[in-house]
Amino acid sequence: MAEAAVWKATGRSGDHNGINHVEYELLDSTQKRVSLAKTNISSIEKDGVKIEPDDQETLWFSEANATKKYKFNVVTLAGTTYEAELNWTQPNPPKPEPTEWDTLIAEKITLAKGLGIMGVWNPKQGYKLTKEYSRISEIDKRLWELVK
């Protein structure tokens, strides 16, 4: 039977491969730290997926993980099994990639403002002969295709 354990943030964090990680320690029912180092642990699973134990006594949890409750099972070399949940809230969820529609609209607005034909009407002389104006026509055609 598994023993209940809890994750406690240590207050430390650090960058690994360009992604911030937050440190957690696993505490047993007596609030004693359970070392997660490979010298103490035979296996660690996060939501059923094995994590390879290393030399770290604590868990460094990536901020790239999605917001949800993560279930961990930790088995020590002595045979004790711990279960703990980490209720994680992603601090900086990634922004979705802009759609083609959004990208084209933003480009069209920038071009039109640069030619003086959007916002304050002050068109540059000969604007209809510029490559920027031609690009606006290309954008309009592509936007029409996306609408169909």
Image (cartoon, grey):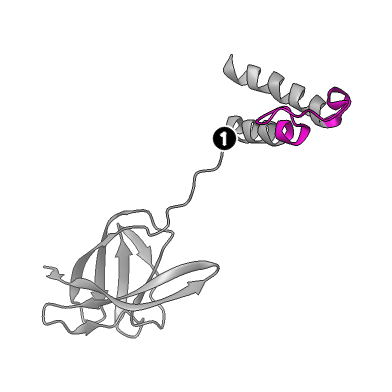
Residue on which the image places disc 1:
99
Q: Residue shown at 81%/31% (left/top)?
A: 132
* Total marks placed: 1
Q: Residue 70: x percent and y percent? A: 28, 58
* Residue 23 placement: quadrant: bottom left
Task: Choose between 111 and 29: the one closer to the eye.
Answer: 111
Query: Which residue is found at the position 34% from the left and 82% from the top?
Result: 57
Residue 55 belongs to the span the image colors magenta: no
Residue 103's place in the image compared with 117, above or below, is: below
User: 6 above or below 118?
Assistant: below
Q: Pinpoint residue 87: horizontal percent, then vertical percent.
A: 25, 60
| Residue 127 in the figure: left or right of residue 30 | right
Residue type indicated by callout 1? Thr
The answer to whether 121 appears left or right of 129 in the picture is left
- Looking at the image, which residue sits at the far top? 148
**Residue in view at x 16 percent, y 78 percent:** 28
Lateral position of residue 30 relative to residue 135, left or right: left
Quadrant holding the C terminus: top right
Q: Secondary structure at mark 1?
A: loop
Q: Quadrant of residue 32?
A: bottom left
- Span of residues in magenta: 111-131
Res 40 → quadrant? bottom left
